Amino acid sequence: MWLNYNNSAKMSGTKFLHSATALCGLAGLAAVLSVLKTVSWRRRIASPVIDLRVILMFCLFYAGDLANVFLIVSVGTAIYCLMRCKAQKCVTLSFPQPHEEEHLVTYIICAFALKAIQFLHKLAVQLSVDVFFLDWERPRTTASKTVSTNGLQKRDPSPISIWRTYFVANEWNAIQTIRKIWPTFQIMAVLFFLEVLGFSKFALKDPLPPAQQSPQVSTPSHSRILRYGLAATLWLCIGFLQVIFSVFYEICVDDKIRQFVDLCSISNISVLLLPHRCFGYYIHGRSVHGHADTNMEEMNNNLRREAESRCGRRGLLPNTDIQTFQVALSTQLRSHYDRIQESFTTRYRPSRLMDPALANQPEQNIRAYHTMNHFLGSVIDHAHPDMDYYVRDKLTLERIMGMEFLEPNDKSIFYNDEAHTFSNVLFYGHEGTLLFFDTLFFCIIDLACQNFVLAAVLTYVEQVIFKNIRLWLGKKNLAFKSQVDERFFL
């Protein structure tokens, strides 16, 4: 038995030595990946120098990548210990020693702290993104007749309805926090396996499987490493299965991201999203029918014509269907955009709360809104030769590295984006970060209190809190940047 104990301790120590080696190697790869992300970010903000802000962004990127390394190493080590301890037919391998558990807990704490930094950074970026809804609708000249002072009759153009913009903005606000998984189902499924089906018994310090344990023997204590490996594995597996299911569900049933793009086309509204100074996303929603302010009969006829291919195609370029783009803006175009945006002096507020000294600000915001709408529309229509753009596909290497090799010096560049990566400014586009953060949060709480139910409850509370923060602050940012009155968001 002494020989078996020494051999098992040696094997366990060797495994942790391998974990440390893997951690060092993967940390180096994470550093290289973070450097590439920093270079891409520096290009997207058009920064000419490497300053303190660039170094800070490298640290933020490295925090997220290093968190993934700690998570991979810790989960891999815990799964190895779980399989070796529970799969042995005779007792030849001891459970991890207390000092070894302390090392792994340190990895887990580091992973959670770094992942929290990454999550808060992504949340801050999403809460500060520039958004503008470009209305392509033009007034019709078939309105009712009016009589002028000289007795002649003339036709006044009908006003353009703002309700289409409000509707699209409200739908964008509604999809800000959608995810590829159902968080409540995730929590309930994990608890079902752990507590109802009794998977938590696999974390006991007993080499025998739960089915072979004698009821007369006192229940041994839990191993923190086995408990962590079991909980993290279940959480990640159920999450990945949900992501796979959501892919098929979106293809066969309902895809809210693509539905939003379709809604933009029907509403004659385009959307410009700028999470970085000179980089963002453009959804081309210009209606192929020319007008969207119409009655039900004409709308149905327009949709029928489009279904029968008796009208133009929805793409930005002629005879194309690509409506979503990644955009790299020239500094001149962005500077002009900023000058107009500076005119957005304040958020909309009810008149009874308005300071009398600021009574003219709503009118100023309205003028700035129309100026921005006209400016962006003319840019898309190539009406500004000094701020023109061209459309191209991204190279395969550019897609893999997540960066653009060409700099938009004279002209902006619109990259075809059939993958709809504009979801990166939503929770939807960062499911991996959210899933890993929830996993580590659940496991940290369980390691602290040794209670899966309490960990699940607190994880649910955490998800609700951050979802509400994202909705509340995201709504305020959306109202200010797009000049859509916050009171129209449901």
Image: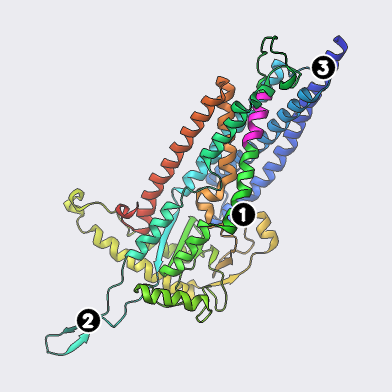
What residue is disc 1 on?
248
What residue is disc 2 on?
144
Residue 237's place in the image compared with 423, above or below, is: above
| Marks 1 and 3, how far apart at CA | 45 Å
Picture coordinates of residue 46, whole percent (x, y) = 54, 57
Q: Residues within 10 Å of mark 2 (few under 14, many from 20)?
A: few
Q: Residue at x 70, y 59 (%)?
A: 397
Bounds of the magenta segment: 226-235
Along the line of sight, which residue is nearer the eye, 417 or 195? 195
Q: Residues within 10 Å of mark 3 (few under 14, many from 20)?
A: some
Name which quarter of the figure residue 379 lies in: bottom left
Label 1 vs 3, first from the N-terminus:
3
Q: Tag 3's secondary structure?
A: loop
Q: Amino acid at mark 1?
A: Phe
Picture coordinates of residue 9, whole percent (x, y) = 80, 17
Q: Tag 1's secondary structure?
A: helix
Q: Residue farthest to the right?
A: 3
For residue 487, side relative to residue 314 (left or right): left
In this rendering, which labeled residue sits more in front, label 2 or label 1? 1
Q: Amino acid at mark 3?
A: Val
Label annotation for residue 7: none
What residue is disc 3 on?
91
Q: Residues within 10 Å of mark 1 (few under 14, many from 20)?
A: few
Q: Tag 2's secondary structure?
A: loop
Within the magenta stretch, is there residue 232? yes
Picture coordinates of residue 169, whole percent (x, y) = 39, 58
Q: Residue at x 42, y 52 (%)?
A: 174
| Marks 2 and 1, how far apart at CA | 51 Å
Q: Amino acid at mark 2?
A: Ser
Along the line of sight, which residue is nearer the eye, 478 or 411? 478
Label 2 vs 1, first from the N-terminus:
2
Name which quarter of the figure residue 224 lies in: top right
